[in-house]
Image (cartoon, rainbow, N blue to C red):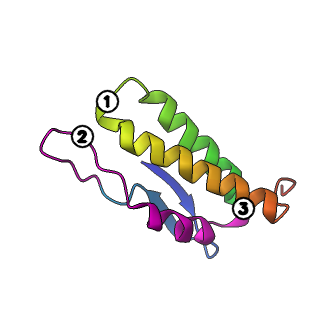
């Protein structure tokens, strides 16, 4: 599970739940949940959160049950990077 903070310091988690299907595969969050999550992340937490998402994906890259969640982590990381570039947040200390 990857955690970050929102703009007022409350924790945000991805994925929000660990639902598992009948075959034991971990289900990803719906795609429409990702954009609102990115908007809630504190600006100074975007890039550290991207690092945690990518590290989490790398740890479980050979585990088929995590495939859908790994893909979502990478999509979420891309959305975070897009926001950081759009809002010129790459230089925030």
- Which residue is depicted at the point 40% across and 55% down? 15
Question: Mark 3 to mark 1: distance in Å?
Answer: 29 Å
Q: Is residue 29 magenta?
A: yes
Crowdedness of circle 3 by 10 Å Cα count: few (<14), some, many (20+)? Answer: some
Dot 3 or dot 2, earlier in sequence: 2
Q: Which residues are magenta?
A: 18-44
Q: Which residue is mark 1?
A: 64
Mark 3 lies on residue: 83
User: With 19 as the anchor, is 86 left or right in this view?
Assistant: right
Task: In the rendered view, tell whether residue 26 sits above or below residue 7.
Answer: above
Q: Residue at x 44, y 27 (%)?
A: 61
Total numbered circles:
3
Which quarter of the figure is the C terminus placed in? bottom right
The mark that comes first in sequence, 1 or 2, is 2
Q: Judge by depth and name the residue closer to the eye, 48 or 77.
A: 77
Place residue 66 in its image quadrant. top left
Q: CA distance from mark 1 to mark 2?
A: 7 Å
Disc 1 and disc 2 in contact, CB within 8 angstroms: yes
Q: Earlier in the sequence, mark 3 or mark 1?
A: 1
Across and down, in percent, residue 56 comes to 49, 37
Residue sitting farthest toward the bottom: 8
Q: Label 2: which residue?
A: 25
Q: Position of residue 92 (x, y in %)?
A: 84, 58
The residue carrying pointer 2 sits among few (fewer than 14), some (14 to 19) or many (20 or more) residues within 10 Å by Cα, namely some
Q: Residue furthest left?
A: 22
Label 1, secondary structure: give it. helix
- SS at badge 3: helix
In this view, the residue in front, 39 or 32, is 32
Figure check: 42 above or below 48 = below
Badge 3 vs badge 2, beta-carbon distance below 8 Å? no
Residue 70: give x, y in percent of width and height.
Answer: 44, 40
Name the residue rendered at 87%, 54% in the picture: 91
């Amino acid at each position: 599970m990857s955690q970050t903070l929102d703009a007022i310091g409350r924790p945000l988690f991805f994925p929000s739940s660990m639902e598992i299907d009948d075959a034991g595969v971990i289900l990803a969050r719906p795609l429409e949940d990702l954009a609102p999550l990115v908007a809630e992340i504190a600006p100074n937490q975007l890039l550290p959160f991207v690092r945690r998402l990518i590290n989490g994906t790398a740890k479980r890259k050979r585990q088929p049950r995590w495939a859908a969640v790994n893909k979502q982590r990478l999509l979420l990381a891309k959305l975070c990077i897009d926001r950081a570039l759009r809002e010129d947040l790459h230089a925030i200390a």
